[in-house]
Image (spheres, rainbow, N blue to C red):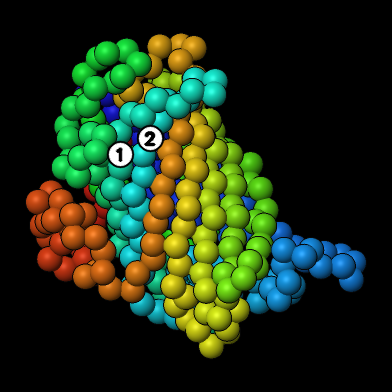
Amino acid sequence: MHNDPFDEMSVLSRRMLLAGGVALGGAAALPAFGFAGAATTAEVPAREAGIPADAKSRIAMIRRMRLRTDAGPVFWFFRGRNYAQQGANLIPLCELTFGAVMYVTPHADGSMDVVQYELGFRTALGSSKRTEQILNPVTGQMIDVPFAPVGPTPVHYTPNNALQLPPGIGGTNFTLEHVPELFYHVGDQVGIHTHSRARAMTPGATDRVLNDMSMICSPAAEALNPKVHFASAMAHGTDVTDYARWWKMPAGSGTQTLRSLGQKVAKYSDMPEDWRAMLAANDPAMAADPIAGLQRKAVEYKN
């Protein structure tokens, strides 16, 4: 099996880290929860009607939508489909069911610590059962599918929402171009559009470029209410990347795209039944007590 320490599951991992992008290793620390600053003139974009303009309020809104503003657990899951993208042609590759377990600890100075565990299961097209091999429809080869949890990983957010991570996760370093978030208020929904472009650099392997985009949506009544700590949220994801190395795509085969839909929930029992069953089969200790499992030593990153 060819290990890929930054494949499309890790793109979702960056989403779970709730960064528009992350800067690791020697890269400069950039604001993962960076906000698109309010207009410097009196004019406010029509798409932002009713959304607070000051930085502190925006950060609080983003946190309650992506995580929570008080202490406690957070669970995210995503379902998605990977495509080979060759010009305007999209060729389905596989499906992905992904889940994350987190615990948030805010501090009086406005900073925040989060510890999280992430595990994704790749399945054949139309299947809900994890697979260890999958057909590459472009090359006709059967491909070994890498599999390993990520974490538990501790991360820290500064008061201005700059994300701080340990360097060299899984032997890979990253450089990042972060695009400031865009905010939308449409009907009774608030949306946050995120986009980051990262370069993954692994010794002995070709660099990979990854564009991670998502639209996180919450009911406006929750997103805009400072008394709400945990806003319900859905996320629509689009990732456009170089191929994960384990796909063994020949040069000139195009790029890889992941389309996904996710939801944030407050209880482990609200995670999808099939994901919980696969977690129990592959990491029974974490499934038995996911919050306690966040205290154990991180699993070696093998993807």
Residue drawn at the location 66% of the way across and 48% of the way down:
179
Residue drawn at the location 66% of the way across and 62% of the way down:
183
Secondary element type, mark 1: strand
- Toward the right, the furthest residue is 41
Q: Residue 57 or 134: which is nearer the viewer? A: 134
Q: Is the residue under label 1 in contact with that under label 2 (CB below 8 Å)?
A: yes
User: Which is nearer the N-term, disc 2 or disc 1?
Assistant: 2
Quarter of the image that includes the N terminus: top left
- The answer to whether residue 264 is left or right of residue 274 is right
Residue picked out by circle 1: 95
- Where's residue 62, x and y in %? 57, 68
Residue drawn at the location 18% of the way across and 27% of the way down:
133
Q: Amino acid at mark 1?
A: Glu
Query: Looking at the picture, does residue 152 appear above or below residue 80?
Result: below
Residue picked out by circle 2: 82
Q: Quadrant of residue 198?
A: top right
Quarter of the image that includes the C terminus: top left
* Badge 2: residue crowd in 10 Å (few <14, some 14–19, many ≥20): many
Q: Residue 163 or 34: which is nearer the viewer? A: 34
- Where's residue 259, x and y in %? 44, 42
Query: Looking at the picture, does residue 188 appear above or below residue 179?
Result: below
Q: Which mark is residue 8?
A: none
Q: Amino acid at mark 2?
A: Asn
Residue drawn at the location 40% of the way across and 11% of the way down:
250
Query: Looking at the picture, does residue 157 appear above or below residue 180?
Result: below
- The answer to whether residue 155 is left or right of residue 117 is right
- Where's residue 81, x and y in %? 36, 39
Q: Quadrant of residue 116?
A: bottom left
The Cα atoms of the two marked residues, 2 and 1, are separated by 6 Å
- The answer to whether residue 79 is left or right of residue 142 is right
